[in-house]
Image (cartoon, rainbow, N blue to C red):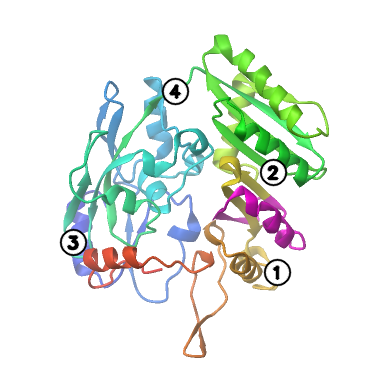
Amino acid sequence: MNSVDEIQEAVRGAESVRVRGGGSKPSLSLRRCQKDVQWLDLSTLRGVIDYQPEEYTFTARAGTPVAEMSALLEEKGQYLPFDPPLAERGATLGGTVASGLSGAGRYRYGGIRDFLIGVRFVDGKGQEVRGGGAVVKNAAGFDFPKLFVGSLGRLGVLTELTFKVFPQPPAFATVAAEFNGLSELLSALDAVTRSAIDLHAVDFAPTQKGWTLWVRIGGLLTVLQERAQALQAVVSAGAELAGDLKLYQDQEDEDLWQTARSMGWLEEAMGLVRVPLTPRRIPAVENALGGSRATMRRYSVGGNLLWLGWPDAAATAGGEQGSRGDLHRILLELGLQGVQLIGRARRAPKQRDGDNIDGGEDPLLGRPLQNAFLRRIALALDPEGKFEQW
């Protein structure tokens, strides 16, 4: 699709509509559906419409690659502080909004919904609708930008997006610490997050020998070293360390967080599931995952988000057993909800009137999505149910 007119015509003439962008989240964009659908490829609907560096805003088409936009912002010393993930895999601005994905920088500056200030989209009737605007302070109209974050294609086809941006810190540094167990890690995490130091990102993950904590700070190079030393003191005082602290700066620091953004720690045969949670729930999550094969995981945003690597059923002999069905059950018992982004796997059959029905390739796992308000909005924008109703 190269134009909004083409999208409008396709939506009006289709019984069911699905959208594809850069293909960075194949569980959402490349999955099979049970009924015939009109797939709209928005990868060619790309390009910057307006960029005002002095106003710290830009407007771009939905199919614009995140990596392309990030490079343009970098030329002006600006960036998207929420660290949009999967850019190296081809993520687009529209796909990032629709999937609601924010990276490690969300800890300091907020998530994608805090930076999206305007949208244009095509609704289920084929009409182009505008919400928000191109200024940061905007109270006009219904708040469609926030509704579309994480909407997963249920409300309409995004065509144009307006973001606010921030100046990029001139330098970054990361303190890394090793711990023998989860309790020591959580004690240090509590000390770090309660400190007066402005933290850019806080991630941690299990290792073969214990746990690793990464804490990133950014700012002026002249004071960064002093702040890094203060951070090291807080980390070491928070819990007993399993080894020496490490300080990453310059390219080493960038490489470390580039791996986090691109999910470079994820093995090829693993699917990727995003699970929102809170730090206090981590011990229960770890206990539930302890006997499973889900050995790859990274907690982000200070423990408020879990990136979970899980065996992909398409590459796992035996299908459901020990794979997606188990993960669905674990998340359900924990009262958590996950969205599968990478990998192909089938969810356990849904129940309806006592009978098993095939749920198809459903990317949602765990606790069912229950949002009566969103359903009412979807009904108003898409009365014929042309978009997905997960």
Which of pointers 1 and 2 indicates the residue nearer the eye?
2
Label 2 or label 3, whichever comes before in sequence order? 3
Q: Residues within 10 Å of mark 3 (few under 14, many from 20)?
A: many
Spatial CA distance of label 1 from label 3 is 43 Å
The earlier-in-sequence mark between 1 and 4 is 4
Does residue 51 belong to the magenta stretch? no
- Mark 1 or mark 2, earlier in chain: 2
Residues 304 and 325: in front is 304
Instruction: Tell me which residue sits at (75%, 28%) in the image.
Output: 237
Name the spot of residue 309 as percent of width and height, x first: 64, 54
Q: Which residues are magenta?
A: 267-296
Residue kind at label 3, given as amino acid type: Gly
Residue tagged by mark 2?
205
Distance in Å between CA atoms under marks 3 and 4: 39 Å
Viewer-closest of 377 and 119: 377
The numbered dot on residue 13 is none
Disc 1: which residue = 322
Classify residue 144 as left or right of residue 262: left
Q: Residues within 10 Å of mark 2 (few under 14, many from 20)?
A: some
N-terminal of the pair, mark 1 or mark 3, is 3
Position of 248 compared to 389: left or right? right
Three-letter code for the amino acid on which mark 1 is drawn = Gly
Above or below, 268 against 215 in this view is below
**Residue at the image point whose x is 59% and y is 33% from the top:** 257
Circle 4 is placed at which residue position?
168
Residue 96, image x and y in percent? 41, 47
Q: Which residue is mark 3?
A: 126
Amino acid type, residue under disc 4 in the picture: Gln
Asked where in the image residue 299 lies, by quadrant, the reply is top right
Task: Pick the quarter of the image with the C terminus.
Answer: bottom left
Secondary structure of residue under mark 3: loop
Q: Dot 4 lies on which element?
A: loop
